[in-house]
Image (spheres, rainbow, N blue to C red):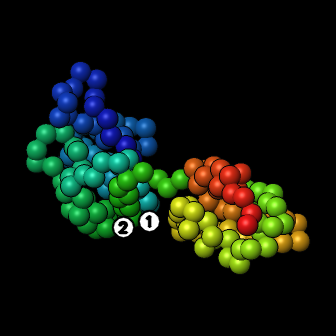
């Protein structure tokens, strides 16, 4: 499910897009949703904008809870996800000096003290035998880890 301004429409006029068909009114859109097979799933990613209502043409609009209830009554699952999707986690292995590795006991804790954040499911671990640090994190944090390793001198 997505929404956009219809061609020639005003900035406050929206069309909902469902399965390639455009609907510009609340009645036509909810009628189309009601025809979906039971146990269908609608997901609305709203980017970084939080909506209180489904933007279906001019007022009266349907609130997110009202639309969720409407879908539930038709045995359709509706997931509203506000905000940007999280950055994907990437695994990268860095070579580190033996001296750098030998003074650290917990890779994640050491990186956190250097300013690296760890979103859910991100990890970091040392491999002393191979003199490596393996981290699973976002691309931005992996770039920060590379800079930290490059500029950290062992004591």
13 and 74: which one is in front?
13
In the rendered image, the vertical position of residue 146 relative to residue 78, given as above or below:
above
**Residue with the most extreme top position:** 8
Question: x%, y% of residue 97?
Answer: 82, 61
**Residue with the most extreme left position:** 60
Q: Which residue is mark 1?
A: 39
88 and 134: which one is in front?
134
Q: Secondary structure at mark 1?
A: loop
Residue at the (20%, 30%) spot, across then down:
11
Q: Quadrant of the C terminus?
A: bottom right
**Residue with the most extreme right position:** 129
- Callouts 2 and 1 close, C-beta under 8 Å: yes
Q: Is residue 44 visible in this depiction of the protein? A: no
Q: Secondary structure at mark 2?
A: loop
Q: Which residue is mark 2?
A: 75
Q: Measure how far apart labels 2 and 1 are at the Cα level.
A: 6 Å
């Amino acid at each position: 499910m997505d929404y956009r301004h219809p061609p020639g429409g005003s900035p406050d006029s929206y069309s909902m897009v469902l399965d390639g068909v455009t609907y510009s009114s609340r009645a036509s859109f909810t009628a189309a949703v009601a025809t979906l097979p039971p146990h269908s799933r609608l997901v609305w990613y709203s980017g970084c904008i939080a909506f209180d209502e489904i933007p279906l043409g001019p007022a009266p609009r349907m609130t997110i809870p009202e639309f969720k209830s409407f879908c539930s009554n038709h045995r359709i699952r509706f997931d509203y996800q506000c905000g940007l999707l999280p950055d994907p986690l990437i695994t990268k292995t860095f070579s580190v000096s033996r001296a750098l590795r030998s003074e650290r006991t917990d890779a994640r804790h050491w990186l956190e003290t250097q300013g690296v954040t760890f979103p859910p499911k991100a990890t970091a671990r040392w491999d002393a035998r191979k003199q490596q640090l393996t981290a699973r994190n976002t691309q931005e944090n992996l770039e920060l880890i590379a800079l930290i390793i490059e500029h950290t001198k062992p004591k």
